[in-house]
Amino acid sequence: MKQFQPISILVAALGGEGGGVLADWVISAAAHHDFPVQSTSVPGVAQRTGATTYYLEVLPVPRSELNGREPVFSLTPTPGSLDIVAASELIEAGRVLQGGYVHAKRTTLIASTHREYAIAEKMAMGDGRFDTRRLSDAANKMAQRAFLFDMRALAWQHGCVINTLMFGAMAGSGVLPFSREACENAIRESGKSVEASLRGFAAGFEHVTRGPVDAAPAVPHKATRHPQRVQRLPAPVQALAGAGARHTADFQNAKYADLYLDRCESVIALEAEQHASAMPVSCETARYLALWMGYEDVIRVADLKTRRDRLARVRREVSAKQGEPLRLTEYLKPGLDEICSVLPTGLAGWMRKRYKGRENALSVGLHMRTDTVSGFLLLCALRSLRPWRPRSSRYAVEQQMMERWLAAIRRAMVRAPGLAHELALCGNLVKGYGETSERGHRNLGAILSDFEGRQPIDFEAHEARVREARIAALADPEGRTLAQSLGLPPPPPKVHPIRIVRRTRGV
């Protein structure tokens, strides 16, 4: 009796990316050829964050040739026995690779190279991103064939959802036993955004069969020529300092950008005397100083949320058509820190004393409709406070700590460039707002106090001490590892009050 082997397909997607619709298209295309097909799924728990998997098996034999027999399909994928694995994001592809589902002699892997950062990556105090190059190399090595390209960019370009690109790439790979006509008819029969879906399908199909086509033109950098002041800097620092100057000017104004360049030049001048060709200390100082000087406060958040390019990006991400109304709700929870950050130093101090022990009293969750005139104007009012920022308490605190950090770098540069480099890298400790910002300031302050209180003789040992403290600060948000590294008493446990609300019985 003739034996038939089903085609096994695993689709790994995120919630809201149309994985279920993609599975329906495969089923419809199989029905067009009268092929037996079965689909099972494991849905995720949240839109855009929950991983959703779909497993399909297709027997590429018309039912008319089965003489009334029915195939028995598996409900779950078996590692190493898949013909196609399609992933809508690179780390989703990595999870499938880690599970052993991709086989070097059988599996065709199709995955998008863009990233939707995982919670673990976002929560990291340092750079918690996974090494995408390592993952791409593994994908090309572990699969029989691998088609890796940025499907999100093509989806935005063609005004479609990423699942259409995946379907087109699967059809173009030649593994699916369907004709292109059957796949396109499946999209038409679904009746959902047919024209946009067909464009996305064609883009994915052509990318796999002919290579990249219809690529979006490269967007030139906003500033192809650095200002004269930046051009006079050493070559290794020019790109970072130029980007930092643009960032700080965008954050505040041109005068603030001049202050940024003044600070960079104070370090560059000292490192130039050391004849360091790569200028590592100046590069790291320019990098983290720019990020620090563009710190996040309510003024900055309101500014970014009301920009035209941000609103255009939101429309593109949700595939809103031209002229189609879009309802946009911002989720905000301002608290005591956010309020005090825009007040003068004296008034902010009074507020903190008044609400000491009751910091959460002013934390109110807000759902602000910024697609309405009143909601958008409220953000515009906050944005208009930019000229006031230099008089705010947050500005004073940040500038004072920046100057202390830069003074430590300059002091170390004179005798120990390696130590200065480690101190420059400590600029990565300060980021965010609220409790995150306070923790970063506290950790950096502890390292600087340890440096300022010592008269180092063994510079290599002191360099290692700063490096160990920096790594400890990034590894432990509670600060206990840092305290142990510097020989300090461990910080007291953070108090989190528990509120018990009694349920009122209904009458």
Image (spheres, rainbow, N blue to C red):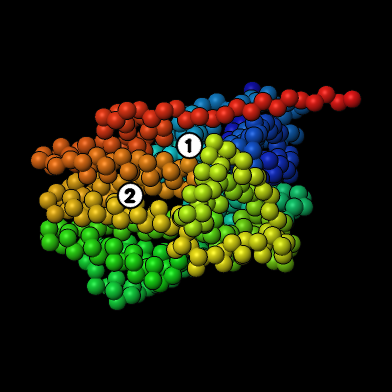
Which residue is more in the foreground, 306 or 343? Answer: 343
Identified at 52% across, 56% down, the residue is 343
Image height check: is 404 above or below 273?
above
Q: Secondary structure at mark 1?
A: helix
Quarter of the image holding residue 197?
A: bottom right
Instruction: Please rate how many residues cluster around mark 2, counting C-alpha atoms within 10 Å: few if below 14, some from 14 to 19, many from 20.
Output: many
How far across and how far down the image is residue 15, in percent?
Answer: 63, 41
Mark 2 vs mark 1: in front: 2
How far across and how far down the image is residue 180, in percent?
Answer: 64, 52
Q: Which residue is mark 1?
A: 120
Q: Is residue 503 left or right of 289 when viewed as pictured? A: right
Q: Which residue is mark 2?
A: 427
State the separation of the CA atoms marked 2 and 1. Answer: 22 Å
Image height check: is 182 above or below 495?
below
Q: Is residue 35 left or right of 352 when viewed as pictured? A: right
Which residue is more in the foreground, 308 or 300? Answer: 300
Which residue is more in the foreground, 245 or 212? Answer: 245
